[in-house]
Amino acid sequence: MVVGAGLAGSAAAYSLAQRGWRVQVLDAAVAPAAGASALPAGLVAPHVSPDDAPLSRISRAGVSTTLARLAALLPAGTDWAATGVLERRVEHARALPPCAPGSPNPMDGWSVEASPERLAQAQLDQLQPATSALWHPCGAWMRPARLVQAQLAQPGIEWRGACAVARLQPTPEGWALFDAHGQTLAQAPLVVLAAGFSVRGLLASADGAGTQPSTESGSPLPLHALRGQVSWGALNELPAAARAALPPWPVNGYGSFLHGMDGPSGAPMWIVGSTFERGNTSAAVTAADHAANQARLQRLLPRLGTLMQPAFQAAQGWAAVRCTLPDRLPAVGVLDAVRWPGLHVLTGLGARGLTLSVLAGEVLAAQLHGETWPLEPRLAQMLLAQRFSRRSKP
Ligand SMILES: Cc1cc2nc3c(=O)[nH]c(=O)nc-3n(C[C@H](O)[C@H](O)[C@H](O)COP(=O)(O)OP(=O)(O)OC[C@H]3O[C@@H](n4cnc5c(N)ncnc54)[C@H](O)[C@@H]3O)c2cc1C
């Protein structure tokens, strides 16, 4: 049983169904991808750091697994496209890791310095002072709800909407899930909590199964809410000069700009994101966040930002709540096998759910089945949810 039908829940369900499990996916909403995964379109891109930090290496594994899943399940060009992504250096140095002479370059095929031609294509070549950027040839855009739907459509997976889980309780056979009226929604030997920030409350409800809270804060998983908003509009309503200045691929580095994919209205859109507001759990669209997105675009792509000023008067918005963990990595798999046997989580995807959810689903299934990890073992260990219960033990 998987609670939550976003990128996390659908990826977990898919990976389990592929291994022969019959999976029920419960969600409070009446349709899948009701939370952060309803993002109209977003980026799949590697993280870069001068020391090739674990997050950078994990992100490359995430990009690989995600692109493979997208290619297997969705039509390229409409639901996703491996266009490459230009990452402009705005505030962060984002240097590539050095490559020792004679050794293979880990960045080969992943990230290179952007050429002057690419900077010119993004209208960034005339900036004063001059700017620089990285080019990620494997970067892609995708419409996350389409991946959620495609993963849930696999044999062995049953989707159940309008099932808001209020509480879970251990049973001799596994776990039982209840709604707010105390009605049993489902029972199963194995539960994966993949309900974003709500996992925090669901774990608290399971506390009857355990003894003491296992972190200082009292929550076994220190999840934080991180609200975000994107602004979008119809591409054909842009002024002609703005349409002529569009970069040929997505650009990120200070927020992001994407265009050309079908938006919520069914017509090709432009989309600018996104805001970050810690501790806010509201999904209401605000004028202040539109202004913040406009300012981001102005800084990221100054010429386009100026030409698009009129478009922001009529911009539409979409907002949701991400959830993060202090080390900025997701929490995957068993949280505490002694306290909560059979209870798994997949959450804390933060601002990288499009890049990391498929990999996280594979890590969850690999842990459960004792399989070889789908990435370097040391990196896989860094994703495991049990890092939080281990830390708090004497
Ligand atoms: C503005 C914005 C822009 C973003 N841009 C990008 C991007 O470009 N690239 C990227 O990689 N990531 C991006 N992200 C992050 C990405 O969207 C998230 O990491 C990802 O969608 C999280 O997926 P999830 O399945 O964990 O959570 P969600 O998609 O929020 O799914 C949780 C599900 O659980 C359900 N649920 C909640 N409580 C209960 C309950 N009690 N019972 C039953 N069901 C419940 C909800 O209805 C929901 O369907 C962005 C996020 C935002 C907000």
Image (spheres, grey):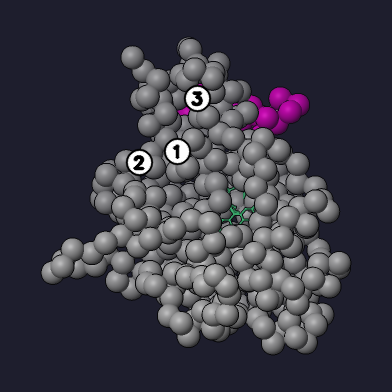
Q: Is residue 379 left or right of residue 193?
A: left
Q: Nearer the viewer, mark 3 or mark 2?
A: 2
Image quarter hosting the C terminus? top left
**Magenta region:** 165-182
Specify whether residue 284 is in view. Answer: yes
Mark count: 3
Query: Does the beta carbon at disc 2 come under 8 Å from ligand 1?
Result: no
Residue drawn at point x = 36 percent, y = 25 percent: 390
Looking at the image, can residue 186 be seen?
no
The disc labelled 3 sits on which kind of residue? Pro
Dividing the picture into quadrants, the one containing residue 243 is bottom right
Q: At which x and y percent is residue 181?
A: 76, 26
342 or 148: which is nearer to us?
148
Q: Quadrant of residue 169?
A: top right
Q: Amino acid at mark 1?
A: Asp
Q: Where in the figure is residue 90, as x and y percent of width and height?
A: 54, 61
Residue sticking out furthest to the front: 129
